Amino acid sequence: MPNLATPRRAVYFAALLLSILFISCQNHSPYEEEKEGEYDGPEEAIRQEIEMTRDLATGRVPWEKLLAAKLATEDAKETARQQRLSALNWEERGPNA
């Protein structure tokens, strides 16, 4: 009876090599992938920021409200940071104190 394990292994090995070769040789250019997420530049970023923050009723950016909101956010962050720091201070109690 002939040994069929060796030819089967060769066929499986060849199929594996061909599939790896096929997958690795697909036409993927890093330039094309970079082009999809291409950065438009600072002018376009500023234009988008203004478009997203403008008031739809007046058509202008309410800079006063934007500044007040930014300052309120910074104050909230500082308050949260102070609360986190104060949570680290404690007084030990118990039989070993």
Image (cartoon, rainbow, N blue to C red):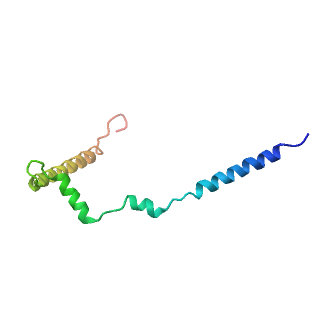
Residue under the image location 89 percent in, 42 percent down: 2
Tag count: 0
Q: In the image, what residue occupies the spot 19% across and 55% down?
A: 51
Residue 75 place in picture, x, y as percent: 17, 50
| Image vertical order of residue 36 relative to residue 81, above or below | below
The part of the image, by quadrant, that contains residue 83 is top left
Residue at image x 64%, y 56%?
21
User: In the image, is 79 to the left or to the right of 4?
Assistant: left
Task: Out of 84 and 40, give the one closest to the viewer.
Answer: 40
**Along the horizontal axis of the image, is 46 left or right of 24?**
left
Look at the image and tell me in which quarter the C terminus lies.
top left
Q: Residue furthest top?
A: 95
Q: Is residue 3 left or right of residue 13?
A: right
Q: Position of residue 61 (x, y in %)?
A: 12, 55
Q: Examine the rendered structure and indicate whether residue 40 appears above or below residue 3.
A: below
- Residue 77, position in %: x, y? 22, 49
Rendered-image quadrant of the N terminus:
top right
Farthest residue in the front direction?
A: 27
In depth, the one of 95 and 7 nearer the eye is 7
Image x and y of residue 90, in percent: 29, 42
Q: Residue at x 77, y 50 (%)?
A: 10
